[in-house]
Amino acid sequence: MELTSKDEAMIRLLLSCYLLMMCWSTATQAAEPMLVRYNLSIQFVDPKQSYYIDLLRLAMEKSRSQYGDYQLEPVTMEMPQGRTIKLVEQQQLDVVWTMTSKTREQTLSAIYFPLLKGLMGHRIAIVRAEDKQKFADINSVEQLKRLIVGQGTDWPDSDILQQQGFTLVRGAAKNLIAMLNKARFDYFLRALHEPWDEVVGHPELIVDESFMVTYPSPIYFFVNRDNTLLAERIEHGLRAALVDGSFDDLFYHHAITADMLQRANLPNRRVFKLDNPLLSDSSKNLLSERSLWFD
């Protein structure tokens, strides 16, 4: 059938309308913000949690010009670290922050940027006040290993210490202070910025002043292995924040770190250095990049 000029004009009009709709649809989709879901604990609402959320927001802001708008969406659910990692693997969450291990780097995609400058590997002890002198008399790692340390059930720290000969009792994170009170173990190692708030309301417990245990132990953001765009965006944003100084500004002035060096009194502590047998080659390669680490 031969088309009339009127028919051809109508077809051209319909085609033009279709192309315009397709362009509008593509532009609308491109303008949609990148959704980033993360786990928000309502049981442990504290500055430690807010630090990682603030840092995630900083990374997304620093990458906005290149990657576009974003939306951070908290998912309120109480769960251990292992469960949060599983939900990222199942794509029910988009990002998790946690201490690294070879297994975690094989399961998820790590953004190789130590969020706390390796601070989680600088650990001081919460002890019972009655045991203060016992710890003041410790002068070697071998002496420390004779005592029992408490750590979280699924914490990489537990494996790091156990593989190096420490006597260890594991427990749920929420129970460890009570377990220390009940003498289930002798001391509870915490990162340099953590113990001060945890002894509040427990006059029978103190933060030990005599020693510090250190080992390389970065916390990373992790995403699903298929979510390469988010991984690229977060790394781009973190690196940009490091270059312009906003990362260090957040790190040194956040509520969790602002007065930690004064409180910890590091010059008067004996330092026991350990290896980290769980550190991957990719993580080891970062150790020479001094601007990434707390010294």
Image (cartoon, rainbow, N blue to C red):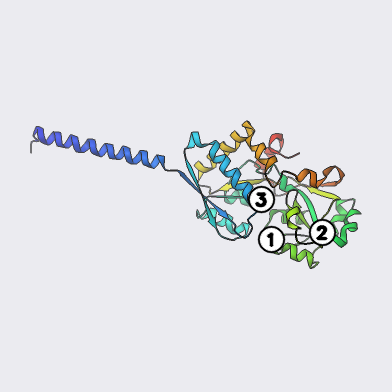
Give the x, y percent position of residue 248.
67, 37
Where disc 2 sits, the SS reads strand
The quadrant of the image that shows the N terminus is top left
Real-space CA distance between mark 1 and mark 2, rounded to the nearest whole angstrom = 16 Å
**Circles 3, 2 touching at the beta carbon (< 8 Å):** no
* Residue in view at x 68 percent, y 62 percent: 174
Q: Are marks 1 and 2 in contact (CB under 8 Å)?
A: no
Q: Residue at x 66, y 37 (%)?
A: 249
Residue 180 in picture, x, y percent from top left: 78, 64
Q: Mark 2 points at which residue?
A: 127
Can residue 232 be seen from the camera position used here?
no
| Screen quadrant of the C terminus | top right
61 vs 108, nearest the viewer: 61
Q: What element carries label 1?
A: helix
Q: In the rendered structure, which amino acid carries the disc numbered 2?
A: Val
Label whose residue precedes the other's in the sequence (3 or 2): 3
Give the numbered dot on residue 38: none
Which of these two is toward me, 263 or 294? 263
Q: How crowded is mark 1: few (under 14 residues within 10 Å), some or many (20 or more)?
A: some
Residue 287, placed above or below residue 131:
above
The circle drawn on residue 48 is 3
* First-in-chain label (1 vs 3): 3
Amino acid residing under circle 1: Ala
Q: Mark 1 points at which residue?
A: 173
Helix, strand, or loop for circle 3?
Answer: helix
- Give the CA distance from mark 1 to mark 3: 14 Å
